[in-house]
Amino acid sequence: MSLLDKLKKNSTIKETAILSRSIFFEEKDMIQTSIPAINIALSGSLDGGFTPGLTMWAGPSKHFKTAFSLIMAKAYQDKYPDAIVLFYDSEFGTPQSYFQNFGIDKERVIHTPITDVEQLKFDIMNQLTNIERGDRVMILIDSIGNLASKKEVEDALDQKSVGDMTRAKQIKSLFRMVTPHLNLKDIPMVVVNHTYMEIGMFPKAIVGGGTGSYYSADNIYILGRQQDKEGTDLVGYSYIINVEKSRYVREKSKIPVAVKFDGGVSKFSGLMDMAIESGHVIKPSNGWYSRVNTTTGEVETKKWRFTDTESSDFWKTILENDSFKDWVRDNYSFGSAVTVEEEEDV
């Protein structure tokens, strides 16, 4: 018996395997959403999406955090007809109509109300322990940001006004315990969180809950928003996805997603600026757009108003263009090249 085989046999962990044959280093499952800009934020690729592991949407109130999570849940159910969503609910601000509006099958959602961090931790660990690799399960927590600790609740019942020093530790413990299960069992978990502004001359948004989320999360997105007006009328918002942490996308990237009051999420939001910068679209005159054949340099004769570009008729050929896909990947994703530069011996 070779040393390699002996060491493998001596392991007490049944999943131990030679690295080249380990199932945990196979290509990760990729779940593509219906919104190209969200796929770029999640993976750095138009054809990408989200993978098993921990993804966190953070931001102030009414910043579309839950909606982004539901878009991901819809994509997971669409890819796997037998998929179940475990929905842990602490805010009760997501009515059934939300799920219906996003096309989520409510018969495949298990709703679990929670009141404190410890209750969440005990239940989610009980679920994860009994889930096997290959079970199609996605976990959604809305939200961790405003969830009290058990001690905080007990102090209030005892009419104590002392500060609670346990909450951050319990949240850190929660993420520390669930992270290995998510990766070992191919489970995506999406968490909604809040942010607060740090004190200082140049304050920036900080994700709530301590350092536990930063250590465990594969992706953390901090959401901002800008008003979308037609004249003086507010018609919607552009939500800016700020990539705070990612294993796949360049950090500090900013990707807009437009949401209209009367039309919902714009499927093609954020793409126009990219297409202009990449040379796949030009503005022949103010307020008009034309596509460019990047192979020949030929500009189409047809001119499009911006409202008319919000359609598959305009974007289909661009989104199928390999050069545009490559441009997006080159500008947003991490490279896969060797991380140590090779140099000649000196």
Image (spheres, helix red, strand yellow):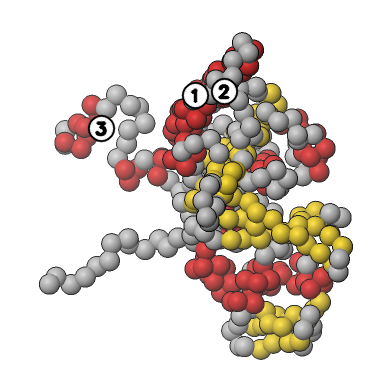
The residue drawn where x is 87% and y is 62% is 233
- In the image, is residue 17 above or below residue 60? above
Tell me whether the residue at label 1 lies in contact with that at label 2, contact meaning CB atoms closer than 8 angstroms: yes
User: From what the image shows, is residue 126 above or below residue 40?
Assistant: above
How many residues crowd mark 2 within 10 Å: few (<14), some (14–19), many (20+)? many
Q: Closer to the camera, 193 or 189? A: 193
Residue indicated by mark 1: 166
- Decide which of 94, 195 is in the foreground and name it: 195
Q: Secondary structure at mark 3?
A: helix
**Quadrant of the rendering where the N terminus is positioned:** top left
Q: Is residue 223 left or right of residue 165?
A: right
Element on which disc 1 rests: loop
- Mark 1–mark 2 Cα distance, whole angstroms, equals 7 Å
Q: Please give the label number shown on residue 8.
A: 3
Q: Nearer the viewer, mark 1 or mark 3?
A: 1
Task: Give the vertical position of 70 relative to 108 (above or below).
Answer: below
- How many residues crowd mark 1 within 10 Å: few (<14), some (14–19), many (20+)? few
- Residue nearer the viewer, 31 or 227: 227
The residue positioned 53% from the left and 46% from the top of the image is 198
Residue placed furthest toward the top:
158
Considering the numbered disc 2 on the image, is that residue within a helix, a strand or a loop?
loop
Image coordinates for residue 71, horizontal then vertical, percent: 69, 46
Q: Amino acid at mark 1?
A: Thr
Residue 265: name its quadrant. bottom right
Mark closer to the chain start, 1 or 2: 2
Earlier along the polypeptide chain: callout 3 or callout 2? 3
- Across and down, in percent, residue 48 comes to 57, 56
Tag 2: amino acid? Ser
Residue under the image location 71 percent in, 70 percent down: 315
State the separation of the CA atoms marked 3 and 2.
42 Å
Q: Which residue is mark 2?
A: 149
